[in-house]
Amino acid sequence: MKRFFLAFNFAFLCSFGLFGQYQSFKTTDGELAFQSFGEGFPVLIINGGPGISSSGFADLAQMLAENNRTIIYDQRGTGLSKLENLDSSTINLDLMVEDIELLRKHLGYDKWIVLGHSFGGMLAYAYAVKHPQRVQAMIQSHSGGLDLDILEDFDVYSQLSETYRDSLNHYSAKIQLGDSSEETARRRATILARAYLFNDSLAAGISGRFMDGNMRINSLMWKDLSQNNFDLSAELSEFNKPVLILNGKNEVAPINLAEKAHKILPNSSLVIMDRCGHYGWLDRPDIYLTEVSEFLKQHSKSNL
């Protein structure tokens, strides 16, 4: 049951209005779309999913753009990024890492700060291992971790009451049995959103995202990670760049993932936010935005 919820729900991020025009460029097998905000040292924001667009991160990107150039992009096959075929030859970790490097080259940056949220944190780790010289510093936001422990530890039920658990099971079962109605999907998403936030009053603002996403991409990506035994612990033990790790105390992705990363990464700092779920900038903007902004200020420099 955990794997079912992981495949369908992990890190489907909140949706907000857009603040700019997407641009795109051609890759070896498709087209990659991106947006940028503000001016200053570049910060790449990698959203979660996998299989979902970056539109839900436009708001966060603008929040962090006061003194930096922030960039979001649609991962391959999502949003406005074009990909003709969706199969194991086009959806895998190596190509997703390559897309990030192609984006850096397209924008002409020598180095940037990389912020990865949820699954995007796993992707940020992989990019940092493959291209450490291009990473000025890294932020791990409610990260999926540096290995596959998330597959065992992820628990969407932990933040739900028994009543909501029963309701979630009910609507999930209906969908599995072929109910494709928008009403069933909406009801399930409304309940599910409560698992990702400590503050229930914010749930309505993110529930729509749980109805979106390309589940073909999601399935292919998790299959690729599993088949290749994703585990970057050894490599990241030698990654000496500054890393800020943020996690909620009331998380579907448990604290032990962040604590493990903190122990392995030699130059990391860990911030655990009380009364906070999977979206720190929503549940605890007072802590999340302050910590991230200070980290960016400390580690940004002119991009010569």
Image: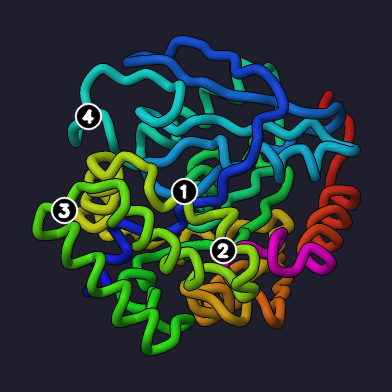
CA gap between label 3 and label 4 equals: 24 Å
Q: Given this view, does label 1 or label 4 mark the residue nearer the observer?
A: 1
Q: In this view, does 109 lie above or below 117?
A: above
- Residue 253 relative to residue 85: left or right: right
CA gap between label 4 and label 2 equals: 31 Å
Q: Mark 3 points at which residue?
A: 179
Residue 269 got which mark?
Answer: none
Residue 86 got which mark?
Answer: 4
Q: In this view, does 42 lie above or below 236?
A: above
Query: Residue 244 occupies which quadrant of the picture?
Result: bottom right
Q: Mark 2 points at which residue?
A: 203
The first of marks 4 and 2 along the sequence is: 4
- Name the kind of residue labelled 4 in the image: Leu
Residue 85 rendering spot, x and y as whole percentages: 21, 22
The first of marks 3 and 4 along the sequence is: 4
Residue 219 rendering spot, x and y as whole percentages: 23, 48
Crowding at dot 2, Cα within 10 Å, few <14 / some 14-19 / many 20+, comes out as: many
Q: Can residue 245 be seen in this view?
A: no
Q: Given this view, does label 1 or label 3 mark the residue nearer the observer?
A: 3
Q: Contact, CB < 8 Å: mark 2 with mark 1?
A: no
Q: Name the residue under label 1.
A: 209
Q: Locate the N terminus and report the quarter of the image it occupies.
A: bottom left
- Residue 214 relative to residue 266: left or right: left
- Name the kind of residue labelled 2 in the image: Ala
